Amino acid sequence: MRRLARMSVVAVSAAALFAAMSGVSYAWTQPLSLCEGSEKDAGGVDCNVGFWTDLSYLDKAGSGWFTAYGEGLTAWDQHADGYGVYAKATWAAGGQSGEVWATGGSGDSKSVDLSFPEGAKITLKVCQTDNGGLYNCLSVTATA
């Protein structure tokens, strides 16, 4: 009888935890990245980092990307979930960087044109953001 009672407590606790987390599961979905050769910039590598609302990877919550052609940096919030998107591009060897914050809600995007030398290795860091805090960050390497 005690064993059944303990199992019931564990089951109820697990159900409560699952219910509490289900409303924010998209906030903790691991980001995925794709980096590939640029179509418009020979030798350049474009990178995109995306966040999804769930593990089906069908509904994107937001993304950030670096485009080699024009050295563009963009953050795009794609879901009304209370989180924004932060993106930063850094050329460590030259001591240059640029960052953008898309925190205005679903559909908000911010972009900036940067200037890096051709062939420079660029670290792209993309995170979800909430009240200035950065979460679920992923860094990848692009080429200007």
Image (tube, rainbow, N blue to C red):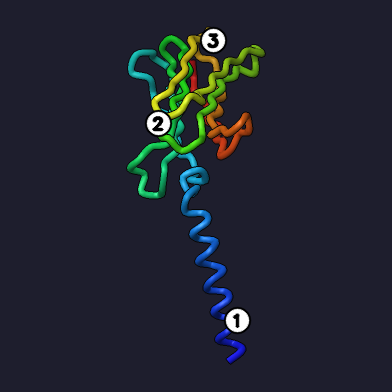
Q: Are marks 1 and 3 in contact (CB under 8 Å)?
A: no
Q: Residues within 10 Å of mark 1 (few under 14, many from 20)?
A: few
> In which image quadrant can residue 101 be found?
top right
Tag in front: 2 or 3: 2
Horizontal side of 36 relative to 93 (left or right) equals left
Q: Tell which circle, 1 or 3, labels the residue nearer the N-terminal end.
A: 1
Going by the numbered disc 2, the residue's amino acid type is Gln
Q: Secondary structure under badge 1? A: helix
Going by the numbered disc 3, the residue's amino acid type is Phe
- For image coordinates 51% across by 34% down, the residue present is 83
Q: Residues within 10 Å of mark 2 (few under 14, many from 20)?
A: many
Q: Is residue 10 above or below residue 27?
A: below
- For image coordinates 53% across by 7% down, the residue present is 115
Residue 47 placed where, x, y %? 44, 26
Residue 78 placed where, x, y %? 40, 31
Q: Is residue 56 above or below residue 78?
A: below
Q: Which residue is mark 3?
A: 116
Alpha-carbon span between mark 2 and mark 1: 43 Å
Q: Residue furthest bottom?
A: 1
Q: Residues within 10 Å of mark 3 (few under 14, many from 20)?
A: some
Q: Which residue is mark 2?
A: 78
Res. 6 mark: 1
- For image coordinates 41% across by 29% down, the residue present is 106
Residue 95 placed where, x, y %? 66, 13
> In which image quadrant can residue 129 be found?
top right
Nearest to the observer: residue 119 or residue 2: 2
